[in-house]
Image (cartoon, helix red, strand yellow):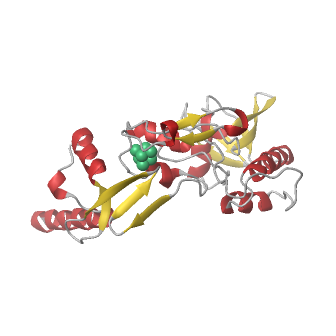
Amino acid sequence: MKITVDGIACEAQKGEMLLQIARRNNIHIPTLCHSDALPGLGSCRLCMVEIADRGRSSVVASCIYPVKGEIEVLTHSDKIKSIRKNLLMLLYARAPEDETINRLRKEYGVPDSIRFSGDKDEHCILCGLCVKACDEMGSSAISTTNRGVTKKVSTPYDEPSAECIGCGSCAYVCPTDAIKMKEDEGMRTIWNKSFHLVRCKKCGKPFATQEQLEYNREKLGDDWAEALCQSCKKAVTGEKLRDIYERTT
Ligand code: SF4
């Protein structure tokens, strides 16, 4: 099926998310709470777009909008730009010093000075992407706690969590600079818990926590003795493929 995004005809599968179709066609839609590795959350609402479906116009969050028929989509109409500007004003009030939020709010014309401004050290926009990543990993070590202005993401009672394996997935997917992960002298510290880092068997670089590798062994059947960092894993796979190619040609 074909849909039109900003006047460009795009091929789409029924049920495919609008954001995914736009990205595949190099059409930029801003997001904060989205990771290609995870299902859409529809939490930050920055990916709102305008759609016209059989003469009816509406505004939808493109990361959680499955395409069902031939629609027309506008990703940067005046209405959409105004919605994003208002959202970014609220996010700027919450995380006034965050680099990502500042870049986006300037892009959408939010002035430097607004009526409300929050804690200068606050970077978390409560999008929930870190919680989703941890849940998908199977650890569920963090969650949102409290309500209203005191709402935050944390481990239970801010204590080091027995469930946390120090994988850092929460920090890697965080769209702002909210989750602090420190690595120093072979140790990783995150969520008030410190982990020893295991060295890569090939290059010797500390790269993963023992708990993370144990988890991978249990859940994914990874060979613990073959603990390799990402770049060495790629190099070894390349060598194996080259070897197969040379032996079969
Ligand atoms: S570092 Fe801990 S809290 Fe973060 S995703 Fe991994 S297990 Fe979850």
Which residue is the extreme one toward the left?
247
In the image, 105: left or right of 161? right
Q: Could you say which is closer to the camera, residue 112 or residue 85?
A: 112
Q: Could you say which is closer to the camera, residue 17 or residue 85?
A: 85
Residue at 59 percent across and 44 percent down: it is: 21
Which residue is the extreme one toward the bottom?
203
Position of residue 90 measured from the top left corner of the image (x, y, whole percent): 79, 46
Decide: is 95 above or below 137: below
Residue at 84 percent across and 59 percent down: it is: 109
Q: In which quarter of the image is residue 208?
A: bottom left
Q: Is residue 170 visible?
A: yes
In the image, 177: left or right of 231? right
Residue at 55 percent across and 43 percent down: it is: 129
Q: In which quarter of the image is residue 219?
A: top left
The quadrant the N terminus occupies is top right
Position of residue 162 measured from the top left corner of the image (x, y, whole percent): 36, 39
The quadrant the C terminus occupies is bottom left
In the image, 228: left or right of 47? left
Q: Could you say which is closer to the camera, residue 138 or residue 234?
A: 138
Decide: is 42 above or below 56: below
Residue at 73 percent across and 61 percent down: it is: 102
Decide: is 67 above or below 79: above
